[in-house]
């Protein structure tokens, strides 16, 4: 606030300073400065929340069992009080694993509206998106909206997470990135949903899982309604159910893989969404040259404002951590189906 007041005095301000009175514009400027700087203060609280969640993430997959999430609430952690329905609407749940059950996705939860300290019609003060640093470094290194898998792997291979651990680029993740590139003719759109999904599994505690359009919402607790808070009975039930579930799956193994390994990347889906028309960049050079000879092509391109591309691949996408190839990498997937809207 003191820094905000350090400006050249305006004519007529002298008597206001002596009398301790300020104009509406002065107060508006002061409050605006506080609002702009408050996010840095709130980020320290966000890191406290993240630390509490990562302490419960024993698998380092960026996920916490919902029974452990509510168990912390039962133990006195006041922050984790959102209802299961509200968490689902926020896109903070992973319900894809039959071995781990319902899980809270750490970065999705951190960036949810329930963790915004300020909510106004025109702006909100929320937890920072830590994945932006990762993507910014990639953008600076690549210098283009698309990149080859090799270029991406070279950059990401030199990155560390926020705990200074190297990115876990195993054969499964490398193969999955190449599969995304195959979908787009050999290059990966850096701002597409599939690449954001890949980044999530490389940095599961920093990069949020990108749900398909329309699957999640950013409603605040007041907008969601009275059921945004979990009840005490629901908390105790989740905790008891978690104990039973854990006892039944702790020793379960499938083809030598533990339940923890088998649940890895079960949330992966094959639908691509692009924020713009990448058709020109994804074409081969000779295709781009021939396109220029087609009458009316320029007018058609000018009329395309935003295009979302959904690439529907095989849904048989069981994926285990550490495996060298998935069913679609072995050639069992269906051919891509591209739909433009």
Image: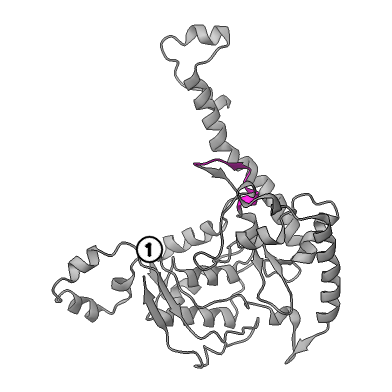
Please give left or right for residue 166 compared with residue 60 in the image. left
Residue 127: give x, y in percent of width and height: 61, 50
* Viewer-side residue, 325 vs 233: 233
Residue at image coords 58%, 11%: 20
With respect to residue 48, does 139 lie above or below? Answer: below
Residue at image coords 69%, 55%: 50
Residue 135: give x, y in percent of width and height: 49, 61
Work out whether residue 318 can be spotted: yes
Q: Residue furthest front?
A: 226
Magenta region: 113-122
Q: Is residue 232 magenta?
A: no
Please give left or right for residue 98 compared with residue 9 in the image. right
The part of the image, by quadrant, that contains residue 233 is: bottom right
Work out whether residue 157 can be spotted: no
Quadrant of the image for the N terminus?
top right
The scheme the figure's colours follow is: one colour
Residue at image coords 52%, 61%: 134
Residue 296: give x, y in percent of width and height: 15, 71
Residue at image coords 50%, 74%: 153
Please give left or right for residue 237 compared with residue 90 in the image. right
Q: Which residue is mark 1?
A: 143
* Viewer-side residue, 78 vs 278: 78
């Amino acid at each position: 606030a003191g820094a905000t007041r350090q400006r050249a005095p305006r004519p007529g301000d002298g008597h206001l300073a002596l009398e301790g009175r300020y104009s509406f514009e002065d107060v508006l400027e002061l409050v605006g400065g506080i609002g702009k700087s408050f996010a840095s203060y709130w980020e320290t609280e966000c890191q406290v929340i993240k630390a509490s969640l990562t302490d419960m993430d024993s698998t380092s997959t960026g996920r916490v069992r919902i029974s452990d999430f509510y168990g912390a609430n039962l133990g006195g952690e006041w922050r984790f009080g959102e209802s299961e329905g509200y968490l689902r609407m926020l896109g903070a749940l992973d319900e894809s694993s039959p071995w781990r059950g319902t899980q809270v996705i750490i970065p999705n939860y951190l960036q949810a509206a329930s963790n915004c300290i300020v909510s106004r019609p025109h702006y909100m003060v929320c937890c920072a998106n830590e994945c932006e640093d990762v993507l910014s470094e990639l953008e600076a290194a690549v210098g283009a909206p698309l990149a080859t898998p090799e270029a991406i792997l070279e950059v990401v291979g030199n990155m560390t997470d926020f705990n200074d651990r190297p990115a876990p680029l195993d054969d499964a993740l490398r193969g999955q990135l190449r599969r995304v590139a195959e979908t787009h003719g050999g290059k990966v759109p850096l701002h597409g949903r599939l690449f954001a999904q890949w980044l999530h599994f490389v940095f599961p505690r920093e990069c949020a899982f990108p749900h398909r359009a329309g699957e999640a919402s950013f409603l605040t607790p007041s907008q969601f309604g009275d059921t945004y808070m979990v009840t005490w009975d629901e908390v105790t039930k989740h905790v008891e159910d978690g104990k039973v579930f854990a006892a039944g799956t702790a020793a379960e193994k499938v083809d030598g893989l533990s339940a923890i390994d088998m649940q890895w990347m079960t949330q992966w889906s094959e639908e691509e969404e692009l924020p713009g028309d990448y058709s020109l960049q994804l074409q081969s050079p000779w295709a781009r040259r021939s396109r220029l000879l087609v009458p009316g092509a320029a007018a058609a391109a000018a009329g395309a404002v935003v295009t979302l591309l959904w690439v529907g691949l095989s849904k048989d996408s069981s994926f285990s951590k550490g495996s060298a190839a998935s069913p679609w990498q072995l050639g069992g997937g269906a051919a891509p189906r591209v739909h433009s809207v």
